[in-house]
Image: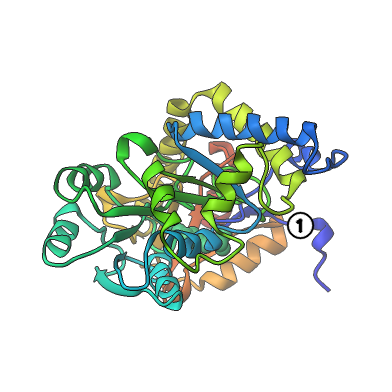
Amino acid sequence: MTDWKNAPRLFIPGPVNVLSEVLEQMARPTLGHRSKEYSQLHGETVDMLKKMLYTEQHVFLSTSSASGVWEGSVRNCVALDETVLCTMCGAFSDKYADVARSCGRKVDELKVEWGMPITADMIDEKLSAGNYAAVTMVYNETSTGVTNPVYEISEMLKEKHPDVLVFVDAVSGMVGLPLHFDKLGWDVVFASVQKAFALPPGLAVFAVSERALEKSKSVPDRGYYFDFQNFAKSAQKNQTPTTPAVPHIMALHYQCTRLLEEGMDNVWARHKKMAEFVQAWALRNFELFASAEYASNTLTTVKNTRGINVAEVINAIHQKHNTIFGNGYGKLKEQTFRIAHMGDITIDDLKELLGWIDEEIK
Ligand SMILES: Cc1ncc(COP(=O)(O)O)c(C=O)c1O
């Protein structure tokens, strides 16, 4: 039987490794979620997140993974007779389109080959030729290791399509990559905490613009659990609509405090350094799956140009060192493998892992 009590060190692109001091935060005595103490914890956490996301608009905590906010963004801000443009460049951006369709919304697709980014020109061309209420993007495509040029895209959107709402999945980007929500003019952005926040899975963080919140008032059938109006109403009391994962929020408070002490510019630079280190190794030994200019700072998807048996290497390192990294995602399994370099992972950790991979493949 697998010994889950001797859990391996994780270099998969989520969940990532969690420091024991962070886990300790989750073992504190719990609080009633309508208590004064909880409101203080919630309020302080949201205030810190606003600083980290560079926003003065709404930040909410959802006791779900980020997939819930895929659904929430669409159900709250796109009416049934409106169309959403879904940009698709890998497994997760593809899923965002599936979610929109499963919510009964009309979806138009903008697809590129996996490994390639979505560009501002592509989106401009599509939006100029149709009538869209919203556009979905994935900041950092966790399957391909591509970071989309969201700053350029956002400049274009603000200038040419200011009425189109912008929903951004930043699940593996938030914290690890620059994110200035208000300046970018985004309407919804979200992440799960098991990526660059380096917490165990089970909570999502999301920001909503004033205009998206206003629009949601007029959209019927928003559902219950992810109704933005309910989140906004509860936020006035520094609370959540339903019982939140209080231990998670304690640990999130701890992580936000650490990240702000470090300073977001330094946090982003640290991620970039780790990415450069892993990319250099990948280029010496294999190739990058992502086109180089767009290779991610939070994970590297390595093209398996040497035809190694990825599952066997992962298994060997697991057995010998109680450490695992990621196989390729979905159809990219064995053709690629993925190494996370986000959250509290360090260059020393990565040196150790890459050394073990070198041993196995020599
Ligand atoms: C880019 C991206 N979007 C969405 C998801 C789904 O997140 P969750 O499983 O936490 O809901 C993931 C998960 O890895 C992801 O990487």
Asked if residue 72 can be seen in this view, the reply is yes
Q: Is residue 50 above or below residue 16?
A: above
Query: Where does the image place residue 295, in percent across and percent down from the top left?
Result: 33, 50
| Colour option used | rainbow
Q: Is residue 231 above or below residue 224?
A: above
| Callout 1 secondary element | loop
Q: Is residue 122 above or below residue 184?
A: below
78 horizontally vs 66: left or right: left
**Of residues 233 and 134, which is closer to you in this image?**
233
Quick one: which residue is furthest to the right in this view? 29
Query: Where does the image place residue 2, in percent across and percent down from the top left?
Result: 80, 70
**Of residues 224 and 300, which is closer to you in this image?**
224
Q: Which residue is mark 1?
A: 7
Ligand 1 contact, mark 1 (Cβ < 8 Å): no
Query: Where does the image place residue 134, in percent across and percent down from the top left?
Result: 30, 59
Viewport quadrant of the N terminus:
bottom right
